[in-house]
């Protein structure tokens, strides 16, 4: 039965059957190729044949699309994996270098502390205070208790003082650029002097 077979399969089966028949009659003839030039199928089989051909074409198309998708997604995945590995190696090197630096710094501090404990403690305290106050926007200063001061607490709004100083700088720069004073009259540009804010905290007894 050759129904439902493809053209290459039919050609191969026909070649085998013809060669087998010729060999049975000892003709000495060898079949090399078989070509199907005109194939006539019954009318009732034509729709099924068309569906079979369409299914085979769809199968080949799906296989090619799958191979193309695999060829496109595999390099992307390999590149992402390589990038993640490189990022991990870079992070590892960064963390290792940071840990080694902290270890070396700790060993240096340990040696300095062994030679001068009091000086090292004061230096660490001053470094810590400097680091904290550099990021602070508000500072509370406790005046020295005693001397009749009562230990008053002073509040320094550094952020507000900086905003006020910047506002004054902007106003002065605008006046210099336009060349006008507050009354609107023309005036020669003057050299701006930077504003300074000085805060002093002391107890009553220190005045």
Image (cartoon, rainbow, N blue to C red):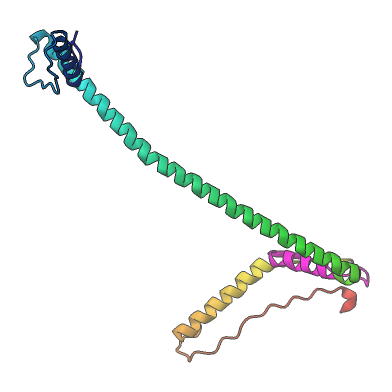
Determine the image quadrant of residue 41. Answer: top left
> In the rendered structure, which segment of residues is drawn in magenta?
121-150
**Is-magenta flag for residue 128?**
yes
Give percent across and percent down for residue 93.
63, 56
* Residue displayed at 63% across by 52% down: 92
142 and 64: which is toward the camera:
64
**Is-magenta flag for residue 67?**
no
Give percent across and percent down for residue 56.
23, 22
Quadrant, the C terminus: bottom right
Q: Is residue 202 left or right of residue 52?
A: right
Q: Is residue 86 above or below residue 10?
A: below
Q: Is residue 85 above or below residue 185?
A: above
94 and 141: which is toward the camera:
94
Q: Is residue 15 left or right of residue 174?
A: left
Looking at the image, can residue 21 be seen? yes
97 and 25: which is toward the camera:
25
* Residue displayed at 63% across by 81% down: 195
Q: Is residue 159 left or right of residue 7?
A: right
Looking at the image, can residue 153 be seen? no
Determine the image quadrant of residue 123. Answer: bottom right
Q: Is residue 33 above or below residue 106?
A: above
Give percent across and percent down for residue 128.
77, 65
Give percent across and percent down for residue 183.
49, 84
Quadrant, the N terminus: top left
198 and 8: which is toward the camera:
8
* Residue displayed at 58% across by 77% down: 168
């Amino acid at each position: 039965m050759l129904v439902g077979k493809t053209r290459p399969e039919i050609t191969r089966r026909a070649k085998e059957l013809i060669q087998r028949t010729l060999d049975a009659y000892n003709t000495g003839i060898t079949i090399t190729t078989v070509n199907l030039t005109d194939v006539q199928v019954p009318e009732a089989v034509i729709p099924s044949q068309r569906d079979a051909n369409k299914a085979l074409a769809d199968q080949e198309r799906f296989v090619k699309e799958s191979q193309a998708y695999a060829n496109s997604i595999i390099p992307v995945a390999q590149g992402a994996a390589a990038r993640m590995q490189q990022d991990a190696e870079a992070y590892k090197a960064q963390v290792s270098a940071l840990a080694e630096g902290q270890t070396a710094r700790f060993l240096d501090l340990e040696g300095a502390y062994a030679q001068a404990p009091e000086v090292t403690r004061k230096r660490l305290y001053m470094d810590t205070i400097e680091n904290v106050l550099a990021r602070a926007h508000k500072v509370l200063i406790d005046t020295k208790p005693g001397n009749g001061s009562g230990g008053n607490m002073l509040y320094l709004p550094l952020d507000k003082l900086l905003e006020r100083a910047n506002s004054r700088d902007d106003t002065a720069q605008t006046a210099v650029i336009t060349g006008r004073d507050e009354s609107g009259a023309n005036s020669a540009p003057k050299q701006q002097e930077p504003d300074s804010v000085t805060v002093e905290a002391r107890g009553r007894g220190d005045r």
